[in-house]
Image: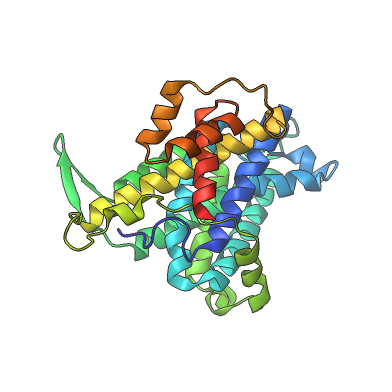
């Protein structure tokens, strides 16, 4: 179950969607407006709150949902690499619009004016992606735990189940709508699998995407002149996935710090960085002087300093 190159290589649309989802979730979290998200009968057929329809596509309602959601979106970037960014943009648009339509129909049928029946977040896209994941991604490894048989795909299914049941009925409904939308795409309704957007739309995502957040230590894992041992392909994939997800979390921490504190440029009154913080960054492979300067700029926050150093390496 190889996801291909590390990070967001050849997956600019996925990167843009993940960043947008993270920013919207952080914004509403800081505003304390998680409870105002979600779709209800009144939102759609009463006051027609269009902003809620839009936010229901991107913003998750809690941090655990955000973590599981971003992990699944990050893994499913493999489909963008398989069919190309153009067709994957069509897949995103088709599944989101259809799952949103099914959610509106479901809310209309249930007719509960007081309750938020649909939890927000890109559930439609995530669970629509489980359809090609089930049919098109082969099982490469099987193992047995306490008499039960599992495969390397089991971890993705478990993450999906966790997300599907995160808000119980409010999350099951959009999840089922997403699976239905993904099934329609696979059945090639209206020949949707042959549709393409104009090329300038997908090239737009490549231009606005931030620098790649791939594995910063990829060079150290190569077999150069026989001096550094090579690793099995599956171990390499696990290492690259770990670093990519770690870098995403560091970047989210950095953005959350910026939005909450709105901190200015480094000031001279910043205390000298603690030696243990410098040693922590040096142990990650960063230069001592660069680590100290990053800590000064980040006001001795190790997570923010790590993100600053990673950004500096990517340029």
Q: Is residue 314 at all visible to an observer of this figure?
A: yes
Q: Position of residue 242 (x, y in %)?
A: 37, 44
Between 40 and 140, the one lying in front of the other is 140
- Image quadrant where residue 266 sits: top right
Q: Quadrant of the N terminus?
A: bottom left
Tell me: residue 148, above or below residue 103: above
Taking the image as shown, residue 168 lies to the left or right of residue 200, namely: left
> Left or right: where does residue 177 sit relative to residue 162?
right
Total numbered circles: 0
* Side (left or right) of 111 relative to 157: right
Query: Residue 196, image x and y in percent?
Result: 60, 77
Task: Give percent across and percent down for residue 279.
Answer: 39, 28
Q: Give the image quarter of residue 268.
A: top right
Above-or-below relation of 121 to 6: above
Image quadrant occupied by the C terminus: bottom right
Identify the residue shown where x is 30% and y is 46%. Answer: 154
- Quick check: can you spot residue 165? no
Q: Residue at x 52, y 40 (%)?
A: 307
The colour scheme used to paint the residues is rainbow
- Image coordinates of residue 312 in percent, x first then y, are 53, 48
Q: Residue furthest right?
A: 47
Rendered position, 93 above or below 235:
below
Choose between 66 and 19: the one closer to the eye: 19
Rendering quarter of residue 299 = top right
């Amino acid at each position: 179950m190889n996801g291909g190159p590390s990070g967001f290589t050849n997956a600019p649309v996925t990167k843009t969607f993940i960043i947008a989802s993270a920013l919207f979730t952080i914004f509403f979290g800081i505003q304390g407006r998680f409870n105002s998200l979600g779709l209800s009968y009144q939102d759609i057929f009463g006051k027609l709150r269009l902003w809620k329809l839009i936010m229901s596509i991107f913003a998750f309602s809690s941090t655990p949902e955000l973590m599981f959601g971003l992990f699944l979106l990050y893994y499913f970037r493999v489909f963008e690499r398989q069919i190309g960014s153009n067709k994957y943009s069509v897949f995103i648009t088709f599944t989101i619009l259809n799952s949103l339509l099914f959610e509106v129909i479901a809310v209309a049928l249930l007719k509960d004016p007081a309750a938020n029946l649909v939890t927000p977040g890109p559930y439609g896209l995530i669970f629509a992606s489980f359809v090609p994941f089930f049919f098109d991604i082969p099982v490469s490894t099987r193992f047995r735990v306490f008499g039960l048989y599992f495969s390397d795909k089991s971890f993705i299914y478990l993450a999906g189940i966790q997300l599907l049941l995160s808000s119980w009925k409010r999350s099951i409904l959009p999840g089922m709508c997403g699976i239905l939308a993904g099934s329609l795409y696979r059945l090639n309704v209206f020949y949707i699998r042959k549709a393409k957007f104009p090329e300038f739309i997908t090239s737009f995502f490549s231009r606005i995407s931030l620098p790649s957040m791939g594995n910063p230590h990829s060079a150290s894992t190569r077999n150069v002149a026989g001096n550094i041992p090579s690793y099995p392909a599956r171990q390499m994939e696990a290492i690259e996935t770990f670093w990519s997800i770690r870098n995403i979390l560091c970047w989210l921490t950095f953005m959350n710090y910026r939005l909450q504190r709105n901190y200015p440029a480094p000031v001279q009154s910043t205390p000298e960085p603690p030696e243990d913080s410098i040693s922590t960054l040096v142990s990650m492979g960063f230069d001592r002087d660069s680590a100290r300067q990053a800590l000064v700029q980040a006001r001795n926050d190790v997570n923010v300093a790590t993100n600053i150093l990673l950004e500096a390496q990517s340029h």
